[in-house]
Image (tube, grey):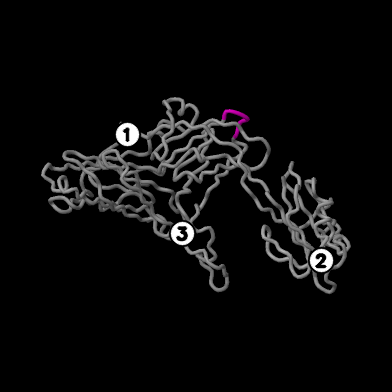
């Protein structure tokens, strides 16, 4: 048994593998249902939901007298809602008024905004969203979620009205969850329509065929905000590309004591864009994809992608031993080994240098010492091949470009 040892680095890329034709179903914001219950005051979310769902509706009613000054002067009252986390949508009389969410360091959040109320009875509905709690660590049992208050309304004739201890109506979960819209049978039980962009609390479904090949698959969710994904009734998980990474992406220096803010990258981008789709979950045809979107993203931007090696690199030093037989511990002279994904072949040599090249995979450049025939051997040995090997000896590159200097063979090839 022989084993090839090389220092190959693969630069992965996500290749488009298909789009989707969507249908939508809007979550009913004002439907409380038979499972709802009312009580005075605010309840902790996890105790109410028993962690069976991320979602808990808090609904209360506010009576506004005809003589309230804001009705005539246009200075809308200020609603303030304090929550233990993790995210919150505020609806006033069925209209989305605002969204707020906490951070990893502090999941607690406060919504504060002017709300448009009318004379008579007004409905304030708050959809509180949890995204998981720790179940280990010191005092983990003290963590909680949901609206714990206070909830106040400022700018009335009376000044401030405290809504915390008035009657609240609770509904666990979403209507779409109760209907099992993520399953084939559940999704067939309602009438779906044409999708409306930027519509909050929307369910989307599409059917698709499994892409050819055996490369890993993923969904590109960069056009969406926050929600959950199911394929053939199985949960891919939560997605949240609308949550952008923040911080300072400056010069990276790991010296000194380490902390989580050292060497940050991709500031301003989503913490995650691609979500893995196990091929074992897919049928050849007729797969059901269901997405629940909380914020109001654009489903037309969702696509299936394949994870492939776009280019492959190797960096091998002269005299670096290459193991020929691991049983006998036999070694041979240094050798560059390149290999594309199964079924793909090398179509182009983007860079090659035997000498003292600089840089890293994707950004190599020639150094002060460079064999001018560095490309030739790789073109001859690797183009059109799925895998290849080149010995790191001066003769392979047309001679020694700088005698007495330790040299390296560096190459970047494109897999097509």
In the rendered view of the protein, which quadrant contains the C terminus?
A: top right
Q: 410 or 134: nearer the eye?
A: 410
Q: Position of residue 124 (x, y in %)?
A: 26, 42
Q: Residue at x 66, y 46 (%)?
A: 308
**Label at residue 318:** 2
Q: Is residue 253 above or below residue 77?
A: below
Q: Is residue 254 above or below residue 364?
A: below
Asked if residue 285 lies in the magenta stretch, the reply is yes
Q: Residue at x 83, y 68 (%)?
A: 401
Q: Position of residue 91 (x, y in %)?
A: 30, 42
Q: Which residue is mark 3?
A: 246
Is residue 92 shown left or right of residue 304?
Answer: left
Where on the picture, by quarter, is residue 110?
bottom left
Q: Nearer the viewer, mark 3 or mark 1?
A: 3
The answer to the question of whether label 3 and label 2 lie on touching residues, with beta carbons closer than 8 A, is no
Q: Position of residue 241 (x, y in %)?
A: 48, 48
């Amino acid at each position: 048994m022989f084993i090839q040892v090389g220092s190959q680095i693969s630069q992965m890329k996500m290749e488009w593998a298909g789009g989707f034709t969507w249908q939508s179903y809007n979550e009913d914001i004002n439907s409380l249902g038979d499972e709802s219950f009312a009580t005075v005051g605010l309840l902790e979310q996890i105790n109410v939901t028993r962690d069976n769902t991320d979602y808990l509706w808090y609904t209360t009613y506010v009576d506004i007298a005809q003589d309230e000054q804001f009705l005539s002067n246009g200075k809308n009252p200020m609603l303030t809602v304090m929550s233990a986390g993790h995210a919150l949508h505020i609806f006033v009389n069925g209209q989305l008024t605002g969204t707020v969410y906490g951070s990893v360091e502090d999941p607690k959040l406060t919504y504060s905004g002017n709300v448009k109320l009318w004379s008579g009875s007004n409905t304030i509905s708050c959809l509180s969203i949890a995204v998981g709690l720790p179940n280990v660590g010191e005092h983990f049992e003290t963590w909680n979620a949901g609206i714990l208050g206070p909830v106040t309304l400022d700018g009335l004739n009376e000044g401030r009205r405290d809504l915390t201890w008035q009657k609240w109506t609770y509904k666990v979960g979403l209507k779409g969850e109760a209907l099992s819209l993520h399953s084939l049978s559940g999704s067939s039980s309602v009438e779906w329509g044409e999708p409306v962009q930027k519509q909050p609390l929307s369910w989307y479904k599409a059917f698709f065929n499994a892409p050819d090949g055996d490369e890993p698959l993923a969904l590109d969710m960069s056009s969406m905000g926050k929600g959950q994904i199911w394929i053939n009734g199985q949960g891919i998980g939560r997605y949240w590309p609308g949550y952008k990474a923040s911080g300072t992406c400056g010069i990276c220096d790991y010296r000194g004591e380490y902390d989580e803010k050292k060497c940050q990258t991709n500031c301003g981008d989503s913490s995650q864009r691609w979500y893995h789709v196990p091929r074992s979950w897919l049928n050849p045809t007729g797969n059901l994809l269901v997405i629940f979107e909380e914020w109001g993203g654009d489903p037309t931007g969702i696509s299936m992608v394949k994870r492939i090696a776009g280019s492959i690199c190797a960096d091998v030093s002269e005299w670096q031993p290459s193991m020929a037989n691991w049983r006998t511990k036999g070694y041979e002279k240094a050798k560059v080994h390149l290999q594309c994904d199964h079924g793909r072949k090398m179509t182009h040599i983007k860079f090659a240098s035997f000498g003292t090249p600089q840089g890293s995979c994707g950004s190599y450049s020639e150094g002060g010492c460079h064999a001018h025939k560095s490309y030739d051997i790789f073109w001859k040995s690797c183009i059109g091949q799925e895998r290849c090997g080149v010995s790191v000896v001066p003769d392979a590159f047309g001679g020694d470009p700088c005698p007495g200097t330790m040299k390296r063979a560096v190459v970047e090839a494109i897999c097509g």
